[in-house]
Image (cartoon, rainbow, N blue to C red):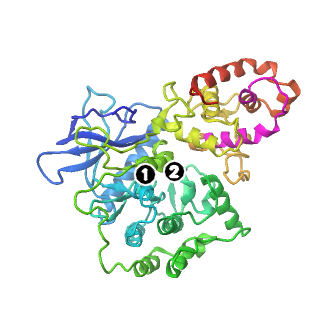
Amino acid sequence: MTEPYAVPVPRGYRVGGWEVREPIATGAFGSVYEGRRRDGEPAVAALKFLPTGTGTPRQLTHLRELVEREVALYRRLRRPRLIRMYDTLVVDDPERPELDGATVLVLERAQTSLSALLSTVPRPPAGPALLAQICEGLAQLHRAHWVHGDLKPANVLVMPDGSARLADFNMAAELEGTHAYTPAFSTPDYTPPELLWAEIGERGRRIRPSADIWAFGVLAHLVLTGSFPLPGGTPTARRDAAAAYARGTDDLRLSPELPDDWREIIRDCLTRTHAERVSVEPLLRRVETAAGTARSPRPLFPGRPRRTTVAAALLATAAVAGLGYGISAWTSGSGDDGRAASGTATVSPAAYGAAELRTDQGVPAALRVLIVESAHDCAQQDVTPALIAAMLKTESDFDPDLSDPVNDEYGIARWTPRVLRFWMNADGTPADTVPAPPFPPAESIPAMGRYLCWIAPRLDAGLRGDRRVLIAAAYRTSYQKVNEAGGVPAKNHDYATRIARHLKEYTPPGAK
């Protein structure tokens, strides 16, 4: 294993009768390894290590909540359409403080994820049957009064017999009446419009079961047509299209390739408001009828399970895995010796965007996807991943818990709450109220990217110095003051010098 894992576990390490073998996937707060044992069934499982080690009190509280949330759901719901949990273990190893006290979930070993499958077979022939099984899993959750909260292809695992299982319940929550409360993070393409501008309270974001229905509609359209149901070449563009659709200024434009019965199903999942959305029980009946699931689906992996290329799957899931809200990439792409299978390309969060952001200069692996994608969401060529990383290093030394009440600045990007209000929403609208810290990286870094993208074209063309450094100086003061000074204002010279130094460190040779 060459890339850094959130919970590094050496090959051959033993816990509860299981021997750790090759790594499968990682997130900032957990890592998954294959586990094997000589006695008992199953002989092979996925071991998900969730640490309870050192960290700040807020980090430990958040981590404990994630562990408790996932364990509680796995214990409550051992159903055929949810990935099975065989056991929960706690590591007792004082000689290894990085592992001592870690919770280990012993989970059913999947063959691949739906996102990895779609990267090689954009429209799998068994797609309708898989959708019926996914919907059945949602129905099982909703009947038990739980919401998944993060349904997407990366969180649907495909077993060796070709059947589907829902997985990764870090965002799942039990309903309290009509709502549940989940962490303030979601995947934009699968988030319903009403949550794009939802307020985040002390307990997180309020979510209804109808959010899962919207996500299922998006997923179904992707599986059946190979495309998203809302237009746009990036998640940000599609998120903006969803907001316009919800406001009634744009219509839903589904693919003409959809069969009529599926078209109506997806349309009833993707309604403008949550109140109009179909509920899961009638949805399941309609999906099963459309899929013709009276017969079993054709196996996706006849004979010996084949190895699957996972590069696209990891790219699709890294935004969540890199932030530690769950382990989303599962694959069978390693041999018994722990080496990657021949012909298998893998991209880990630690190597994400390596052509634009160096991997050997201390940029935290868990933040790379956020940094790179926040830069990519901006069309201004001077807003680069290296610039955002250099600014985060200069502003906070990558500290997500920074708190500077004297200057009213908080979080990894040193946001002033009254300023963050105007940049925290992806649709460009200001928040209804001034947000209150703490501001997590998932909120702070994309907001920084939006603000920099707004600043860049407002700087005069004839200014002295590196445009990227000028953009950073404008973030610290204002674009008007940079324009008035004809470059970096004198009071910001030290700041600009540090930005320039980190830019040089983080920019790969040959990249800007």
Q: Quadrant of residue 499?
A: top right
Quarter of the image with the N terminus in it: top left
Q: Which residue is mark 1?
A: 170
Q: Which residues are magenta?
A: 444-470
182 versus 264 height, above or below: above
Which quadrant does the C terminus fall into? top right
Q: Within 10 Å of the Cα at label 2, are there few (<14), some (14-19), or many (20+) other Cα atoms?
A: many
Q: Are marks 2 and 1 in contact (CB under 8 Å)?
A: yes
Label 2 and label 1: CA atoms lie apart by 9 Å
Q: How far from the left and from the top, in percent, is residue 40?
A: 12, 51
Q: Is residue 153 above or below residue 318?
A: below
Q: Which residue is mark 2?
A: 183
Q: Inspect the image, locate mark 2, and give the three-letter code of the amino acid beneath it.
A: Pro
For residue 212, side relative to residue 395 (left or right): left
Instruction: Identify residue type, mark 1.
Output: Asn
Q: Nearer the viewer, residue 468 or 17?
A: 468
The spot of residue 149 in percent (x, y) is 48, 59
Q: Is residue 271 left or right of residue 226?
A: right
Left or right side of 22 for 380 = right
Task: Say which of 120 and 176 sits in front.
Answer: 120
